[in-house]
Image: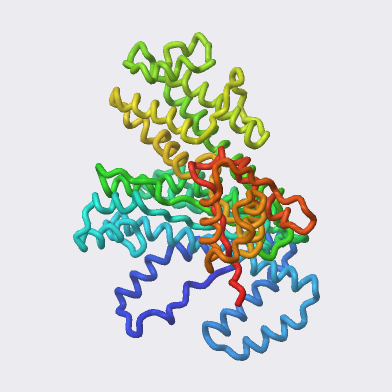
Amino acid sequence: MKQAAPDTALADPAPTRSTTREKRDSERPLVEDIRLLGRILGDVIRVQEGPEAYELVEQIRKLSVAFRRDADHEADKALKKLLKSLSGERAVSVIRAFTYFSHLANLAEDRHHIRRRAIHERAGHTQEGSIDVALQRLRWAGITPRSISDMLATSYVSPVLTAHPTEVQRQSILDAERDIAHLLTERDAIKARAAVVNAAKDALTPKEMAANELQMRARVMQLWQTRLLRLTKLTVADEIENALSYYEATFLREIPKLYAELEQALPGQPIASFLRMGQWIGGDRDGNPNVTASTLEHALTRQCDVALRHYLTEVHFLGSELSLSAMLVPFGPEMLALAERSPDTNEHRQDEPYRRALTGMYARLAATLKKLTGGDAARHAVAPQNPYARAEEFLADLRVIEASLCSHHAEALAAQRLHPLIRAVEVFGFHLATVDLRQSSDKHEDVVAELLTNARVEKTTANLTNTPNKRCCWAFSMMPARCVCHPPTTANTPCQNWRFLRPRNACCAASVGRPFATTSSATPKA
């Protein structure tokens, strides 16, 4: 499938020749990528569906372009007639072809946005929405770096991921498209390397480009032969897994990078972990009977599993990197004590305190994973160790290693992996993200009223205040510390709502010093 150059009809009313030329030059890489992906898709269709199917798709494409770009009404009539004549099987083939072409074109556009942003950054140009622009405006307003740091220390920003039960794209499709996006990035890197050598004597670049295109062709072939849509409706468990895939692919690594940018922009100022993730997938019971206490517990367990496995992987790689020997580097008593607590008795590592300490930390993380999720670490750990009770304990051990590296001027070793890991633990803890317990406020009030009745504090919450949240806060603050709030047991009490709230107590060891959020989203009754 071919792609015409982007339509310039929406450009400025009277662009100059130089402006038009610059626009075309800047968009040339995008056009090249779209044409490459379109050509590969066309080749796949020709091989898989036959030349007739390919020619049909091309004919539809050309008629569509003629009508849209040239306002050719004859082409419009021919297109409508052609589409009406298609059999059901042929129509599905055409729909799949143009659907995948749209997906591939979107990947190329995403890559082009990243490419253009990098060009602007190299040229020293700031872009709207960037951290640099935001900090520039703060400086122009006379706000000092210290004031910004103090403000962030008392701030809390939490992007919340929501469920999308209408999501029809399968994980297999998303994974293949991510691979294609990575190959487009790799293709730019190959071109950049080729630009600094003599093209006439460059025998490597053509081979690299051919290998890259071959991998891209395989992924497009995979897309064409993979079912595009789900045949069954997403379950809540599916929604949870879809959300967690974004943490593994993006958030766990990119959010620490965002903090690193702020630290570089505000040198010498502490940057509090004000940005943390939240979601309501698994906790959104408002109108969804499929979300139960078991669903919430499953969501929290899976979140914990994702966070801990990320930390296990990073600790493993840290152990391979921090091979520093006590025969060459001085170690302080706190670092040596951490190493001594490790069960690692391998004689080949006795002079390597960092590796010994990290082996012990890995074993404790593995025990934490087992305790909180029931899962096993991917790599074999040494003798079983006591699990970490809280994320702060793990963080404290990482801080010991950080202080030790800085004490012998090895900050460069800390910056690459240790600092991002420390920030990740601060942001994600053992719980990964807070979960909003979304339920009609009257249901929460029923639970609180029942608890207060059992605790002999108050018979009802209705007369406390007109605001549901204030009623709940007042009720819990009035409970004597000695009160034991038993779950409802009678047939007409909101037992399921009590069970829905209770799992967070079992998982509180996986949170960073604060409970999971509970919110009421229903519109108050008149």
Q: Nearer the viewer, residue 156 or 161?
A: 156
Residue found at the far bottom of this picture: 73
In the picture, the quarter occupied by the N terminus is bottom right
Residue occupying the point 75% across, 73% down: 91
Please say if 60 is above or below 248: below
Residue 166, image x, y percentages: 67, 65
Which residue is rendered at x = 61% and y = 74% of the image?
525
Q: What's the coloring here?
A: rainbow
Name the side, left or right, on which 163 lies relative to 277. right
Q: Quadrant of residue 10?
A: bottom left
Q: Is residue 336 left or right of residue 297?
A: left
Residue 21 occupies quadrant: bottom left
Residue 238 seen in render? no
Residue nearest the observer in this picture, 103 or 384: 384
Where 421 sits versus 250, above or below? above
Q: Relative to 229, does residue 195 appear above or below in the rendering?
A: above
Q: Quadrant of the C terminus?
A: bottom right
Q: Residue furthest top?
A: 347
Q: As rendered, which of 178 and 170 lies closer to the eye?
A: 170
With 9 as the anchor, is 311 left or right in this view? right
x 39%, y 20%: residue: 335
- Image spot of residue 425 (x, y percent): 47, 39
Rendering coords of residue 179 (x, y %): 57, 50
